[in-house]
Image (tube, grey):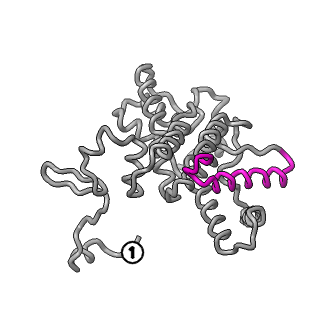
Amino acid sequence: MKNRSALDAYSNGAVWWDTAISDIKKNSIVLRGFPIEELIGTISYSQMLYLLLCGEVLSEKKARLLECVLVAGADHGPRAPSIAAARMAATCGISFNSCVATGINVLGDVHGGAAEKAMKLFYLTNSILEDDLQQSLSDVVNEQLNRLEKEKEKLPGFGHQLHDDDPRVRRLYQLAQALIDEGEISGQYLKMAEAYRTLLEERKKKKITMNVDGVSAAIQCELAIPAEAAKGIFALSRGMGIVAHAFEELQNGVLIKGPCPNREDLVRYSGPSIRHLEK
């Protein structure tokens, strides 16, 4: 984004809002050049998402794969901070949309940001391979693992606190493989993701699992989705689960359910002992 004042730009003759996404006039709604009435009933939710974001209509098979990514990330129970926050908010008497917003607003670089980081890494890896045709995939992957280790950064999209064989990963790879076989996608980023997992496993000398963020990142790279859009796409995905959990908690009628039960053994005070102001 250019660092300029909107008022300065406007005074120089620019329009206030300049968008290539939508053209809205009386009795007319045009999105990326398509009349809305042609899109309704013709394209799917995932095709519409890609059209608005990237400007083109995905093939039905690619759109189905993107939809599978959205389904895979929809919910991971109250262990997930975004779900827990939405449920806690629902017990505080705020509006339902505010409960949903609370859960969405928890998503960021730490919780919900791994796919974006992995996509940036995958795109970087691919650009290095394109610039230096002499380097093999394993060479570049090893170089990037060395860099991450030097910078004390974790490899994004790999490892999970709960799963050591995430069923979402296996299923997404299976679905993606069918599109690779049909020539719908290249498979280069999925191959790259597996190379990172394998080489990290060799380095650590223990089993390393890819998580749903890693495979989702690879699939989104296969579809040429910008890495910077990944957190927004994940918010749409996890938003389904957030809506469901917040609604369920509202139905329970429980009030003020805090982050943890009201038990002394779960909260520790580590400040100074009792003291008094000097008189």
Q: Is residue 278 visible?
A: no
Residue 165 x, y percent position in the rendering: 72, 36
Q: Is residue 2 left or right of residue 126?
A: left
Q: Is residue 271 left or right of residue 116?
A: right
Task: Tell me the amino acid under the disc marked 1.
Answer: Asn
The residue under the point 60% across, 44% down is: 176
Q: Residue 149 at what x, y percent from top left? A: 76, 62
Residue sitting farthest toward the top: 252
Which is nearer the eye, 123 or 57?
57
Q: For residue 162, which quarter of the picture?
A: top right
Vertically, is 148 above or below 244?
Answer: below
Quarter-of-image position of residue 42: top left
Q: Secondary structure at mark 1?
A: loop
**Mark 1 nearby-residue class (10 Å; few <14, some 14–19, many ≥20):** few
Q: Position of residue 257 (x, y in %)?
A: 49, 28
Magenta-colored stretch includes residue 272? no
- The residue positioned 34% from the left and 33% from the top of the image is 95
Residue 205 drawn in magenta: yes
Nearer the observer, 176 or 111? 176
Q: Residue at x 52, y 43 (%)?
A: 65
Q: Is residue 236 above or below residue 249?
A: below
Q: Residue at x 41, y 37 (%)?
A: 100
User: Residue 199: percent from the left, percent from the top?
Assistant: 79, 55
Q: Which residues are magenta?
A: 180-206
Q: Nearer the viewer, residue 255 or 85?
A: 85
Q: Nearer the viewer, residue 125 or 234?
A: 125
User: Farthest residue toward the front?
Assistant: 182
Q: What residue is disc 1 on?
A: 3
Quadrant holding the N terminus: bottom left
